[in-house]
Image (tube, rainbow, N blue to C red):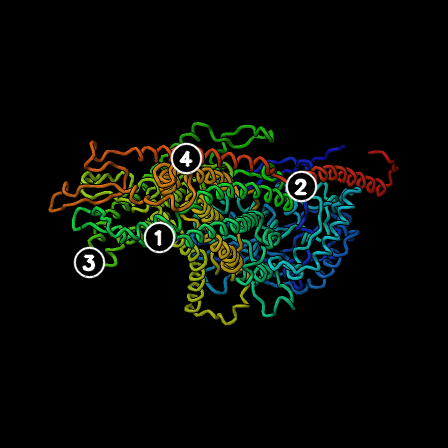
Amino acid sequence: MVHHSCSIQSFKQQKGMHTSISQIIKDKTLKPSRRSLPCLAQSQTHPQNLNRTLSLHPADQIQSKPVSAGSSTVNVPCKKGGGKDVYIEEAEHTTYDSRTDQSLLIQKTPNHPKLEARTESLQENNSSVPSSLLFRDGKKRIDYILVYKKSSLQVEKRCTFERNLRAEGLMLEKEPSLTNGDIMFVKIHAPWETLCKYAEQMNIRMPFRKKCYFTDWKSKSMGRCQRHIRQLKSWLPKNPMKLDKEALPDLEETDCYTAPFCQARMHHFTINNKETFFSNSTRSRIVHHVLQRTKYEDGKSKMGINRLLGNGTYEAAFPPHEGSYKSRHPIKTHGAQNHRHLLYERWARWGMWYKYQPLDLIRRYFGEKIGLYFAWLGWYTGMLIPAALVGLFVFLYGLFTMDSSQVSREICDANDTIMCPMCEKNCSSWKLSDSCVYAKVTHLFDNGGTVFFAIFMAIWATVFLEFWKRRRAELTYDWDLIDWEEEEEELRPQFEAKYSKMERVNPISGKPEPFQPFTDKLSRLMVSVSGIFFMISLVLTAVFAVVVFRLVAMEQFVSFEWEFVKKNWQFATSGTGVCINFVIIMSLNVVYEKVAYLLTNLEHPRTESEWENSFALKMFLFQFVNLNSSIFYIAFFLGRFAGRPGKYNKLFQRWRLEECHPSGCLIDLCMQMGIIMVLKQFWNNFMELGYPLLQNWWSRRKIKKGGQCLEHKVLLPQWDKDWNLQPMNAHGLMDEYLEMVLQFGFTTIFVAAFPLAPLLALLNNIIEIRLDAYKFVTQWRRPMPARATDIGIWYGILEGIGVLAVITNAFVIAITSDYIPRFVYAFKYGPCQDQGYRQEKCLKGYVNSSLSVFNMAELGNGYAGYCRYRDYRAPPWSSAPYDFTLQFWHVLAARLAFIIVFEHLVFGIKSFIAYLIPDMPKDLCDRMRREKYLVQEMMYEAELEHLQKERKKNGKRYHHEWP
């Protein structure tokens, strides 16, 4: 086997300010092909009229002589006398050497009838390409848009940056805005030679052969069986959730082997059309790569479009959308106008809420990173269906058994049971039967199904994560992402600029690269960790303030003049406390984001993925503590340190600590979770869709006030329309993932207290998918199509939440709920003692057993008689008054034993399930190994065939052996 390597040609050095990208990026050696995956970029089935915006030049129009970039006139701002910006005309005459001739283009690919038909259709409609996606010459495709203000003072930097972009091979053209006289657009086009150069440098994998599949008698027989199964399925009703191929013809594809692109081996690749060989997303990614590494001033850190955006040189930088997302003609009869229109009709419309997502089309338009997010979100939503059904069943079980519950009946019938006053001022004793409604509501969430549901959700979380790993493996295979990270992970420009003088040899590539010393990294990390702990302490301070408010509000509501509030003082205290807590949570989130951004930049992460992971981890820690600290307080501290009548513990010697209701503290925890979860979902949905809608409406209103004519908005060029849209979040998908991961924590960590959490999450996610889709397609500018192999650090966070969920649910059941005290009473102290728990009658007398007696005469102030309070203490007439009884120690021991048994049992089941489910399907592993072998064979055969043709062409003698 012969291995071929392709070296990158060194770039020409630019003098003075014409510093080229080759000064920053080292040459890379092309690695041999290691896998083959389906190709979506080259083999596309376009819906009707879709090719108007995708194909510019038919293959038969490509000349065999070297391609020369025609001269195009551009407006270049230069600073002249008087400090004014004067725009002069600069002729751009650049000639590019082409190593590709007509013989390297495959004019007719055998066994590709669909591909031939598509190519003919592309040629027929070439004349109708919308001008809003092209240069003024009507031929060059716009790959990227830069936006700046004419009034900006950063003219010199902009001129230098644009000169360097041209030196790197990009072509620029400027257009003024039709809606704002101060705005200028810079249209960027990447010629074929520039695309090839950087595709080779970035190791972008491109198609070179159609797949052939190995078949034996087993696969043939299985093929016959599959045909019979398909025939049977054709007789059955269609799955309404599936998207019809007629509705999404663009999802049809042919499988191709792929390999890292190399100009020296260009004859290996299937190049039917130079303009469509590199997809729109790939072209934008290449241009973005150049923009990130082009200098605008002398100096090691004076480079990159991000810095120019930060200092006001440019206002925005984005790839253009492929046209309008709406059409005057129905898509069923006239077809889709472009990919954006197709995504809107088949994905982003609210009427498609029950349909599967077109993941391949999403990936093709927005890139693999966004495609993986929607794949994960769809998988998570689908897995929530069984969890929501089981949680709803547990809730309905509590609803139907509410009136027959022994505990609820005893509380509602306890008209003679006098409870001790809830405060020391303006409070009197009250009857236990007054809390009948509170006890019934508690039974909805604290019943016999609570333990089962907690175990089920712990197992569900493991199954969800394990099967997601399998799904991710299939997607990375289908999307050509296997081993992508180790091939293409690049250093951040800021890291390169900061540590350019300190280099060491990379152990993988064997080439020198910037290096961050350990002492510098450690010192920066310590400062970052200190900032994290400071912010977490700020969260705990806010929670303490809410606790103080609850103590003050409790005294006010208990002595309230309105009888309804006075009777339901616990609901009023919990409700107002959680609402104030929610306001504090949302206010502090704004501060956390800025602090996390500063701390992450201070660390100087090496790569973009490291920056995103570090920032995401900080945001998760901040918001997780911010969101759940009050819930942890209610679950594990509320009522645990209140003391007893006559000897209550007080905060600052003034406010008496809260007590739990006689039926338990679980209802307080349930209210806290339910209100925060619902309010946060409403707020997030408004900020994701409502806020961009309002911003876009305000932008249109300002344009109207400025005297611009919007009646002909459809005639605006695409770059003007995109500029009036909102930019994607500064942190990309971090906010989207963070919202869902926090929701996953709500769904699993305290699910024993709130079994309806999975159902609320499911309903929210059904809306969230279409809301995010609508936002990406219609309200946001097109983001840069980035690549990713997984969901990043979020998977590790999800696994950590799954472990924490087991521990917290064990403590919630053992400590917060009354499951263990009822269990101990039924087996040891009730009418069925030592006989086993059989039915509700075994809990007869449980409420009376859980209440202790206090002599109110000890309080003075005219009190007399006895009252009851929730605890296991000896009566005042015993030899050791108010000491803990033996039942208290039995309950405590049972709680500790339950925590240990529950955790070990659930962790054992989780580990066993994770062991049984492999991370990658076996058929996928076999396919990858088989295709790796075929790729090597085809590369050898393609090279041999090429060399044989070269010998015949040169008139040399032909031999059958390897030359």
Figure check: 719 above or below 271: below
In primary-sequence order, the first of circles 2 and 4 is 4
Q: Residue 899 carries which label?
A: 4
Q: Which of 755 and 840 is in front in this view?
A: 840
Q: What element carries label 1?
A: helix
Amino acid type, residue under disc 1 in the picture: Lys
In primary-sequence order, the first of circles 1 and 2 is 1
Q: What element carries label 3?
A: loop
Q: Nearer the viewer, residue 110 or 933?
A: 933
- In percent of the image, x 65 and y 60: which residue is there? 238
Q: How crowded is mark 1: few (under 14 residues within 10 Å), some or many (20 or more)?
A: many
Residue 20 placement (x, y as % from top left): 56, 42
Per the image, the residue denoted by label 3 is: 561
- In percent of the image, x 20 and y 56: which residue is there? 560
Amino acid type, residue under disc 4 in the picture: Ile
Residue 48 visible in this rendered orientation of the protein: yes
In primary-sequence order, the first of circles 1 and 3 is 1
> Gap in Å between the C-alphas at discs 4 and 3?
44 Å
Residue 264 placement (x, y as % from top left): 71, 40
Q: Which of marks 3 and 2 is in front?
A: 3
Residues marked 4 and 3 touching at CB (< 8 Å): no
Quadrant occupied by the N terminus = top right
Q: Which mark is residue 440?
A: 1
Per the image, the residue denoted by label 2 is: 924
Q: Which of marks 1 and 3 is in front?
A: 1
Q: Which of 4 and 879 is in front in this view?
A: 879
In primary-sequence order, the first of circles 3 and 2 is 3
> Gap in Å between the C-alphas at discs 3 and 2?
71 Å
